Image (tube, grey):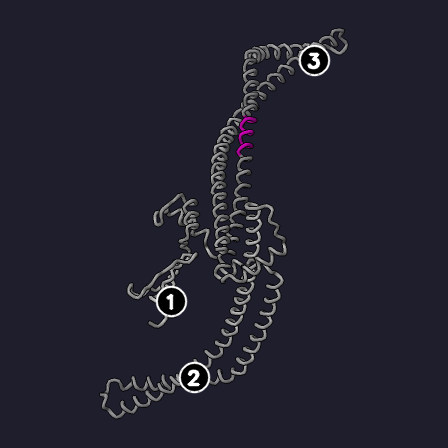
Amino acid sequence: MPARSLERTGSPPPPVGEQGKDFTLDNGSVVHTDENGIPYYIEVPPEGDETTPESGQESGAEYGDVEPGQESAEDAAEVQANETLRTDAEILGNRYPVSQMIKGAGNTLQWGKERAAAAWNNAMEQPGLLMDKFMHGLAQSSYDRRKAKLDEVAHLSDNHPLKKFRMRKLQKAEARLNKRKANLEIRQNRMTGRVEAVKNAYEARREATIAELSERADKARARKALREEMRSKRKEQNENVDVGWFEAWVVAKKHVDSMPKYQRRRIASAVMNAAEASKNSQEASWQARYAERASADAQNRVESIGGQLQQTRTELNSMRQQAGEIANMESDLVSVRENAAKLQEKADSLSDDSANKFAAMYEAVKAQQQQENMEKAIADYHKRLAELQRQETQLAQSLIQAQKDVENTGKEFENRARAEAAAKKKAEATQQARDRSVENTFV
């Protein structure tokens, strides 16, 4: 039988009777041969489905020997997120800013030239556009007049000569209107098409620039990942192997250039996913540390407010123990006021020439000072007692709020700690996916 061409398709193999001895390649592809031993069909496994023993052992070790089709939805979603391919714009990001600026400026300049040319051509067509609009308006008014005249004889029979005459006139007017309308639309579409063509050309050049630079970024990230992988393997397997920087650079460049584009994109996406996951993990760690400090500060605040509240209550109890003395002082104040009033009245009754005038004035002043001292002591006591009571109330409320803050910050710290653990787990998973994507290129 004639030898068939070697096909790499997903179609089923020929009937069993036409097959010879088959064999499997290292990458899991099955080569089917005819009865003469000539290969005619290669059955390629689905993309992402590694059938080699190494890949099976690796996936089994990573996912706990889970049989295919039995993995959980979370594991499947995690694997899909780690293997997500990025778009050209995401791959490029802020890399090659000078090239982006230069190519963007050139694209903008070209857009300006094309825009000016389109505007000039549209300006040259403005007289024709005005003429088409004018002729369309005339045709529309003629059609409206013919339509109105036909409506006047609508009650007549269709075979009436006048109605038939006006119907023919209306048909001619409608034909002229359609012709003028078509001419107007063609010219308008041509003018707007020029502007759209300029816009589409600008977007196409911009997308081509992004695709070109993103491919450079793909290669750069893949080369860096390969160099890191070679250095890590050299340290793990044999520290005596000396691989220079230039040699590693040359090997990585040749290896990356020989890769298909989709494989480079997969490596670059895995590298970016790993970097993003590492950044998120670091940020989650910072947030966890901040939440931990906030929880500790809230706990210290509770202890501080509790100490102040205890001291205030101790002083308040001491003030309350003096309540009896203050009550006696208030009762004695009445007699002291009366005595001071009597002494003042006695001193005022004496004449200035009296020998007892000075002694009486002295006694009156002394009694007045005693009265003022007692009033001041009573007022200071009540003022201090009110301040302590108000301070106790405020501290009690602050303590309740601080305890709530401790509870809230504790919960926040727990949430941040869980988020940190999840971020670290995701970072490890993305790093493993990155390593796998690089190692698969060596097979």
Q: For mark 2, what is the residue?
A: 183
For the residue carrying disc 2, how many other residues have a C-alpha within 10 Å: few (<14), some (14-19), or many (20+)? some
Q: What stretch is highlighted in magenta?
A: 295-305
Total marks shown come to: 3
User: N-terminal of the two: label 1 or label 2?
Assistant: 1
Mark nearest the camera among 3 and 1 is 1
Of 259 and 172, which appears nearest the observer? Answer: 259
Residue 5 percent across, percent down from the top left = 39, 70
Residue 153 percent across, percent down from the top left = 27, 86
The disc label shown at residue 365, or none: 3
Mark nearest the camera among 2 and 3 is 2
Q: In this view, does 164 lie to the left or right of 231?
A: left
Q: What residue type is labelled 1?
A: Ile
Q: Estimate the spatial distance between the alpha carbons at disc 2 and disc 3, rounded to whole Å.
A: 119 Å
Of 418 and 263, which appears nearest the observer? Answer: 263
Element type where label 2 sits in the image? helix
Q: For mark 1, what is the residue?
A: 38
User: N-terminal of the two: label 2 or label 3?
Assistant: 2
Q: Which amino acid does label 3 sit on?
A: Val
Q: Is residue 296 in the magenta section?
A: yes
Q: Is residue 296 left or right of residue 60?
A: right
For the residue carrying disc 1, how many other residues have a C-alpha within 10 Å: few (<14), some (14-19), or many (20+)? some
Whether residue 421 is situated above or below residue 172 in the rendered picture: above
Location of the N terminus (image quadrant): bottom left
Q: Is residue 228 left or right of residue 157?
A: right
Residue 23 percent across, percent down from the top left = 38, 59
